Amino acid sequence: MEKFPQKLASKISQRLKDNALRSLPKASQLVDFSSNDYLGLTKNEKIERQIQKNGATGSRLLTGNHELFDELEALLQSHHKAESALVFNSGYDANVGFFSSVPQRGDIVLYDELVHASIRDGIQMGHAKGYKFAHNDIGKLKEKLVSLRAQSSRDTEFYVVTESVFSMDGDSPDLKEMATFCAKNNCFLVVDEAHATGIFGKGTDLISELGLENDVFARIITFGKALGCHGAAILGSKQLKQYLVNFARSLIYTTALSPHSVAVILSAYQYLKKESSGICKQLYQNIDYFKQEIERFRISDKFIASNSAIQCVMISGNNKVKEIAGQLQQEGFDVKPILSPTVKEGAERLRFCLHTFNTNEEISQVLQSLKNYMAT
C-alpha cells in the first residue's frame, strides 16, 4: 500500500524544511564524545556475562520474575541507601509508569521545564494536572505552588519533579534547597537521576552524595548510561513499591527484562563497587581538564555551566550547529548536534559527553577544532 496520510507527510516535509529531520545513525569508529557510556563499562571485559537462561518468558507478575530480580533489587536498595527498589525495563518505562499512576485525579505535578520527555509523557497519560516552572528556579516554583494551592482542594497532593543532572544542559538544581522547600511546603519530591547514576557519591547517585535519601519521595535511576547496560529502577518506600507493582501499567503489561540482562546489571554494579573510586576519579579528572581547556581556548562563555560529564556549547540555528558537528566528525570526533525542536529554537547546541577513556590529547584536539570552526 503506497498511499501515505497527507497530514503525516506534511509534518515530515516541515522537518525537512527546518533541517531537523531525524534519521538512525550508522555505527562509527570515531572518538566518542557523544554516548552516555561515561565510565566506559560497555567496553569493560571484566564484567562477566555468565547467565545461561536468556528468555524472560513473561511479565514480572506472571512468569518473568526471575530470582535475579530479587538479588538486584536488594543490591540497589543497599547501594543507593533506599528502603526499596523496583526494576523496570527502561528509564522511559519507569517514568511513564510512575507519573501515569502515582499522582491522582485532583493532584498537581510541578515539573522543571527541561525535564525529560518521558516524564512529560507520563504526566499526560495520568489524571493529575501538570504545570512547568522555570528551569532550576525555586522562586518561580514557589510562586506557582502558592497560586495553585490557593485554587486547590484540601486533599490535593503536590509533586515536585526535577533531574539531578539535566540531559540537554548538563547542569543541576540546588537539590538541598529543593528538598528543604518540599519539606516545608508538604510536597513530594521526585528526582530523575538518569545522568547521575553510578557517577556521583562513590558510584551511587547525586542524592546519595548529598545525603538526601530520606528527603526524596522517589528516585529514578537508570542502567543504560554510566552502568553500560539497560533498564532502570524506582527507589522509594516499600509502600511505593507495592503500589507500583499493582498500578504501574508499564511494569504490569510488558515482558520482563531477560535474566541475562539482569545478570549483566548485577555484574556492572559488582564491578562498580570495587572500582568506583578509580574510574569515577578518572572521569572527574577529564571533566576538570575539559573545563580548563575551554578556559584556555577562551570559549568558556559559550558553554553552559556544568560540573557533570555533559558539556554543551551553544551554537544557534540547526544549519550552523549541524555544519560544525559535521566538520568535527570529519576530523574523527563523534560530537552530536542537538537541534530544535528537541531544544528551543535559538538554543541549539553541540553536546560533549565525557568518558573515562577520553584522553587529554583528544579533548584538546576537539576543542581546538571547535574554536576554529566557531570563528568561521
Image: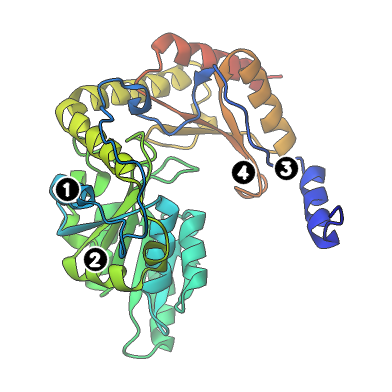
Nearer to the camera, 241 or 373: 241
Tag 4 or tag 1, which sits nearer the N-term?
1
Q: Are the two marked residues, 1 and 3, in contact with CB atoms closer than 8 angstroms?
A: no
**Which residue sits at x=78%, y=58%?**
8
Callout 2, which amino acid? Answer: Lys
Label disc, if present, on residue 185 of the rendered structure: none
Callout 4, which amino acid? Answer: Ala
Residue 292 image point, x, y percent: 39, 20
Residue 295 image point, x, y percent: 45, 21
Tag 3 or tag 1, which sits nearer the N-term?
3
Tag 3 or tag 4, which sits nearer the N-term?
3
Callout 1, which amino acid? Answer: Glu
Query: Around disc 4, counting alpha carbons within 10 Å, would you say few (fewer than 14), some (14 to 19), or many (20 or more)?
Result: some
**Which residue sits at x=33%, y=79%?**
157
**Which residue sits at x=25%, y=61%?**
179
Residue 249 image point, x, y percent: 41, 68
Q: Are the two marked residues, 4 and 3, in contact with CB atoms closer than 8 angstroms?
A: no
Callout 3, which amino acid? Answer: Leu
Which secondary structure, mark 1?
A: helix
User: To which residue does mark 1 refer?
Assistant: 71
Which secondary structure, mark 2?
A: helix
**Which residue sits at x=60%, y=47%?**
343
User: To which residue does mark 2 refer?
Assistant: 241
User: To which residue does mark 4 refer?
Assistant: 347
Look at the picture and state if 123 lies above or below 146.
above
- Which part of the image, by quadrant, shows the N terminus? bottom right
